[in-house]
Image (cartoon, rainbow, N blue to C red):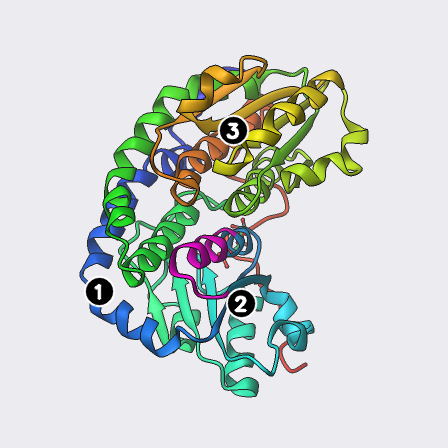
Amino acid sequence: MDDALYPSDHTYQEIMRQQEQWKVALQHLEKQKEFFKDLYKENKDKTWVFTGCGTSYYLAQTASAIFEMISGISCKAVPSSEILLFPSLVFNPNHNHLLVPISRSGTSTEVVQATQKVRIEFSIASLAVSCNPNSTLIGESKYKLTFPFEQEDSVVMTGSFTTMLLSITFFAALVAEDNQIIDLLLNLPEKSKQLTHENEEMIQEIARNNNFDDFIFLGQGPFYGIANEAGLKIQEMAITIPQSFHTLEYRHGPMSTVTHKSLITIIYSENSAKYNGPFVRDMKKLGATILAFMDEKHLKNDLSIDFNIGFPSGFGDNLNVFFVMPLLQLFGYYKAVSKNIDPDNPRNLSAVVTFDIMGNG
Ligand code: F1P
């Protein structure tokens, strides 16, 4: 299989152009500062419930962690179906809530129905985040976070994931009046683009290696949603079954499945340093190969790791997600290519997943 046949397709182009889209979104969002500040003032004492389906749910996981860490607002993440089926578990009557429904298309059935349900049954307002400003979801919501976005032709979400996440992160930094994060965010697109290009070949080589048949993605805090999303990418694009866990949870049972065919991808966080060494040593003893993402200042301490990707220092956990995600999207893409599967056309999947069984339930 000649990989060079593929880099003209939608998925590849959409992965590689994402940092340009971040710049456009940031320029647009900067003009909305006052709107964001008012929205924050009206809702800062509520619990913010981030929700979505599939990729947008994993985005909700990451975004809720980042938003809480930057703004101090209490946040949580649930799949939209949970709001339809177990609303009392999501919305504690002793708390006030703002719903933050997230959807590339703005039309996935559960997220739209969840937004309608909380408005009608619980009088809960929503702040919808979408790449489609004219969608049903946006129409259903009191507040909206949108930006100019060149629509994705690919079924799988790539640039849409990171652009929506970046917008939410920017919003958090604005309301927290954290100028340091705002400055870092403005620098991020170029730095992330550079890192993606520098490491593309290595990611391609690892994806091509047929010795691996077990793919594990590990991360904690904001990286947990990234680990889940990385797993979903190889599932959708490369029809490969992944595992993803909070990093240290992996030792409590799942590691019994490790073999010399396991590729364990670990995303290090700032305060995970003392655990990383022992964890990696244990996994290597069991035969695993390790791909680690970490701050570049730690690179020289981790010589036992098989493949290392170091991101520039100083951005912090909340922004480091933007270094990791494009490369793990590329991993899914190149895994598909190496298996001779067309990443643009995932099996059994369409760009929007809808169903009508819950219409009147
Ligand atoms: C979410 C979703 C994706 C999936 C595929 C179909 O859609 O289910 O998770 O990868 O792209 O759509 P959306 O609600 O964000 O449009």
Magenta segment, which residues? 62-74
Q: Which residue is mark 2?
A: 111
Query: Tag 1: Cα neighbours inside 10 Å, few (<14), some, or many (≥20)?
Result: few
Q: Residue 331 has which mark?
A: 3
Q: Is residue 97 left or right of residue 358?
A: left
Disc 2 marks a residue whose amino acid type is Val
Q: Does the residue tagged 2 have its C-beta within 8 Å of any atom of ligand 1?
A: yes
Residues packed near mark 3 inside 10 Å, few (<14), some (14 to 19) or many (20 plus)? many
Circles 2 and 3, Cβ within 8 Å, touching? The answer is: no
Q: Residue furthest top?
A: 303
Mark pair 2, 3: CA separation: 28 Å
Magenta segment main secondary structure: helix
Label 3 amino acid? Phe
> Picture coordinates of residue 317 (x, y %)?
44, 41
Q: Which mark is residue 295?
A: none
Q: Is residue 312 above or below residue 91?
A: above
The answer to whether the residues at label 1 and label 3 have Cβ atoms under 8 Å apart is no
Asked whether residue 94 is in view, the answer is yes
**Disc 2 or disc 1, which is closer to the eye?**
1
The number of discs equals 3
Q: Residue at x 34, y 71 (%)?
A: 40
Distance from label 2 to label 1 (Cα)?
25 Å
* Residue on which the image places disc 1: 32
Q: Residue 132: image x %, image y %?
A: 36, 61
Label 3 CB, ligand 1: below 8 Å? no
Task: Work out how far the residue at label 1 is from the one at label 3, CA to CA, in angstroms.
Answer: 35 Å
Res 14 quadrant in image: top left
